[in-house]
Image (cartoon, rainbow, N blue to C red):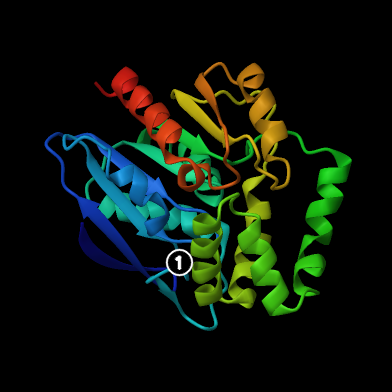
Amino acid sequence: MKEYVIDNLGSQLHYWIREGESNEWLVFLHGAGLDHHMFESQYAVIPKRYNILAWDARGHGKSTIKPQVAINYRDMIDDVRMICKAQHIDSATFIGQSMGGFLAQDVAYFHPELVKSLILIDCARNTNKLSKLEKIGLKLQPYMLKAQPEPIFLVKSAQMCGKHKPTVDFAYQKMRQLGKERLVETLVSLRQAFHEDKKYQSHCPITLICGKEDKVGMIIKAMKTWRKKDKSVYQTVWVKNAGHCANQDNAKPVNQAILKHLNKFLA
């Protein structure tokens, strides 16, 4: 894939494009602490007709951020918009994992014209009503994360990403590169993703994918009830033998679900 660079809101963003044979675009958005390499097993099976765009979010991977600028979730939404504008992408299917899934939902929420469909992997629903316990958990999150020594924090965070050693090792390598301070900053900023909207229905079709052994927060709970709350959900795929990064832990059923979605809505 060809590498591009764009500056926005105190960050130099790196992203990559594989040109396709049509005008259809797939935009891949990775999880917190990781980078665009987490989708390598997906890029390999995407038919050549599709254009692929994948990024490293601000501060992640090759993308840098000025020392005085905090990693901010809302800035990431604007980063996605700016990259799409720079590449003249009018609409795309967004494929996001965890943080990337939150971002994909909010691009669809705030900039619906940019989103043709969504494929969301191991993430919660942004517009759900949070329980009192969940709200308390989010308020306490910064203190709980900051209290952990960096070596323990990075190991635990990586272990939450997957069931299998290659997934955990990948996550640890990327998170160690990012560092505890920036990773905590990123995770805390994700609280901005939650904005209750009881009446919200997606304007576009959604595929949900979740590792059966995902142990992160409220994700499995949200995935189980999503279809009842949003009629735009096309399919919910539960991935056996997989944790939070289901697309890395067990790529084959994830790839099958992605291709089924593309064949249904972008054929």
Disc 1 residue crowd, few under 14, some 14–19, many 20+, Cα 10 Å: many
Q: Is residue 18 left or right of residue 233?
A: left
**Label 1 SS:** loop
Measuring 75% from the left and 79% from the top, which residue is drawn there?
149
Residue 176, compared with residue 237, is above or below; it is below
Vertical side of 204 occupied by 62: above or below = below
From the top left corner, tell me how far across and down residue 106 is, in percent.
52, 42
Residue ID at (70%, 70%): 153
Residue appearing at x 64%, y 59% in the figure = 159
Describe residue 252's horizontal placement relative to residue 186 as left or right.
left
Q: Compared to 85, does 155 lie above or below? A: below
Identify whether 42 is placed above or below 4.
Answer: above
On screen, residue 30 versus residue 263, left or right, reads: right
Q: x, y (%) of residue 216?
A: 69, 48
Viewer-proximal residue among 31 and 108: 31
The percent coordinates of residue 222 (x first, y second) are 68, 32
Instruction: State whether residue 30 appears in this view.
Output: yes
Q: Residue at x 64, y 76 (%)?
A: 181
Tag 1: amino acid: Arg
Query: Quadrant where the N terminus lies?
Result: bottom left
For label 1, the residue is 58
Q: Quadrant of the C terminus?
A: top left
